[in-house]
Amino acid sequence: RNLRKRSDADSLAAAALFSVRSDPADALRLIGQARSAVLGRPELTLLHVQICTRSVGCDPKPLESEMRKQDPQNGVGWSGDISRANDAKDEEALDAAIGAAGRAMQFNSYFMTLAARLSEATAKSKSMPLNDAIIAVSGELAGFGLPDYTSISKGCAIERMKRPGLLEFCRQLAASLVAGDTLMAEGFGVAIA
């Protein structure tokens, strides 16, 4: 509740994070306010994408496009396209999304950036001590399913490697994942290399 009373972007983003399971519509409103309070922070845009995907009637595609503009060297902005193409069993769209993600230099989920900033904001709001805020924020962030590493893995599965150009796309994506900001991304990159 204390976070909602503050007007800074990180406090509003933390309030959104803590409310997404109980009230996704309110979480969308709060993350929208957070992003309006400060422009050009791709980690907040990714959090917005993650909240949007959990909210009925929210289309994450415009947010994903915005994130790709904010951080064009980050392949995570293509993970939604990879997931949708995989779900639709659209081989050409999946190849294109893997290729686009692979052209990025890294695959960052901003986990540590978000954990640090939102934990600090939570502690400053007197909602809880910093050590408890770190645990709470990290736990909530870990609950998000983005990026969808399963779809990435399926997209670069051995049985698909006969598709023209896909082997090179997957090698590039593997390098992008290995250069990412989490052990999870690095592990998936090593696995598909």
Image (cartoon, rainbow, N blue to C red):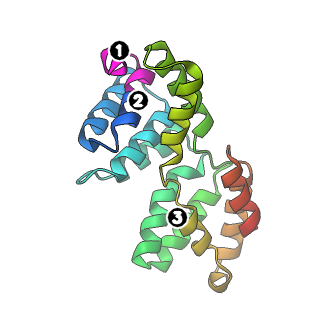
Local secondary structure at mark 1: loop
Residue tagged 2: 13
Total number of numbered discs in the rendering: 3
Local secondary structure at mark 2: helix
Q: What residue type is disc 1 on?
A: Arg
- x, y percent for residue 94: 51, 71
Give above or below for 176 relative to 161: above
- x, y percent for residue 156: 64, 73
Residue tagged 3: 97
Q: Quadrant of the N terminus?
A: top left
Is 180 placed left or right of 133 in the picture? right
Local secondary structure at mark 3: helix
Residue tagged 1: 6
Is 186 placed left or right of 140 in the picture? right
Q: Is residue 11 magenta?
A: yes
| Magenta-colored segment: predominant secondary structure | helix
Q: What residue type is disc 3 on?
A: Ala
Which quarter of the figure has residue 163? Answer: bottom right
- x, y percent for residue 192: 71, 69
Mark 1 and mark 3: span between their CA atoms?
A: 38 Å
Q: Is residue 127 magenta?
A: no
Is 47 placed left or right of 36 in the picture? right
The mark that comes first in sequence, 2 or 1, is 1
* Residue 184 disc label: none
